[in-house]
Image: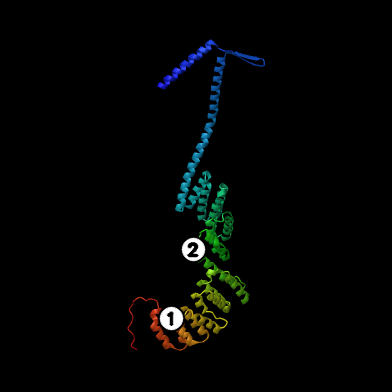
Amino acid sequence: MKKLFIFLLIFLVAGAWLGQMMVQDPGYVLLAYKQTTVETSLWVLLLLLIVAFALGHWLLNLASGLRLPSNKVRSWQSRRNQRLSQRKSLKGMVALSEGNWWKAQRYLSQAAERSELPAINYMAAARAAHEQGDNSGTDALLNKARAATPQAEVAIGLTQAQFQLERGQLEPCLANLLNLRRQAPKNTQVLRLLQQVYLRLEDWLSLIQLLPELKRQGVLNEGQLAELEQQCHLQRLQQSLATLPAEADEQEQLRVLSRSWQAVPQHLLRDPALVRRYSELMRQIGAEAEAEQVLQDLIKRKWDLTLVEVYGTLAGKDPQKQLDTAKGWLKKHPDCAELELTLGRLSMRNELWGQAISHFERSFELDPRVETFGELQRLLQHLGETERASQLMQANFNRVAPQLPALPLPENASH
């Protein structure tokens, strides 16, 4: 109230002063343009200018107001589309989680047309189409996602690769993943899917080449990597012979198998499964002598019980020399059950039956294994020492047989 009073007071004082000035000297203004002249007082001109300014300002506001409704309409339409898209997206995602694939595809496709992030809706709709087995519909929706959001190519490509892998379209999936790897070489999901495709294709060489990158990017843990590496080299050994033509001779088979064995990393050369598989394959192609030499060299470099045991199963070029080599190891390893088992087998190859029995008995004494017991029993049976074999069985049955449950048994027969 006080401010209003002060404002009115100032307005009255200013008005009185201005009126006094207009009475004392109205002023004179002459405007001339070509043949036209306009005469007026200064104060009238000032009043006309003020009126003209106010009129211009009003016209500008009016023009702006005419445009405003169309902007409001567009804004309203945008908000409405956004609300519709959100509602349909929610319904689509709920249907997707419930496994209602047809409804999910319908709602998500409709939501994508109004969404600010259409690629997400299109990819979810593609999942629904894929679950219905609609391959063409799936690919069409993914293409729409690419067209709407080109910068999301890696995410869209990964989704497509997953679908291709689930369909069993391994070759297109591989081509897709190799393209994605060029775009995103460190993407762990690309590498993980690539590993799965190579496994399904049984492309062991490519998988071996991929292993270092899987390790660098932490795609698999140490245990999984070790298992996968072992599987790759085992299968590659097997595959090396399987890919040869049927008419390939022994030398060609030996050359191919040796090349595959030489490709095995140093830390896997003593892997029990690999060594056994390599020895079996060498035995299969009649190259046990070469395998015996390979194992002998490995054992010389580093003592390994698995290699020692496998060494006794191979028929070397010179059985006596092979036995002498194994006996030489006995000096440094006198209480080794695996070595005694190997010496027993090599003694049998040299038909030294007494020595073989002694080595088998010593091995069984050090480590009562079923395998050693079986070798000893077989030898005694073939030597005709059935009574000794029977006594051995009775004395050591509980040591080699699995733990049996306590059950009623018949009385011992008197005859």
In the orientation shown, which residue stands out farthest toward the top? 24
How far across and down, in percent of the image, does residue 219 sit?
A: 51, 59
Q: Quadrant of residue 296?
A: bottom right
Q: Is residue 60 visible?
A: yes
Amino acid tagged 1:
Phe
Q: Is residue 35 left or right of residue 13?
A: right
Point out which mark residue 222 bears: 2
Q: Is residue 413 left or right of residue 195?
A: left
Residue at 61% from the left image edge and 77% from the top image edge = 250
Few, some or many C-alpha atoms within 10 Å of disc 2 (few <14, some 14-19, many ≥20)?
A: few
How far across and down, in percent of the image, does residue 354 sit?
A: 47, 87
Few, some or many C-alpha atoms within 10 Å of disc 1 (few <14, some 14-19, many ≥20)?
A: many
Q: How is the image coloured?
A: rainbow
- Circle 1 sits on which residue? 364
> Distance between the Cα atoms at labels 1 and 2?
36 Å
Vertical order, 276 against 221 (above or below): below
Q: Nearer the viewer, residue 255 or 318?
A: 318
Residue at 62% from the left image edge and 76% from the top image edge = 251
Q: Please, what secondary structure does the residue beneath circle 1 have?
A: helix
- Which image quarter holds the N terminus? top left
Amino acid tagged 2:
Glu
Q: Nearer the viewer, residue 134 or 261?
A: 261
How far across and down, in percent of the image, does residue 151 sit?
A: 56, 49
**Mark 1 / mark 2, whichever is N-terminal:** 2
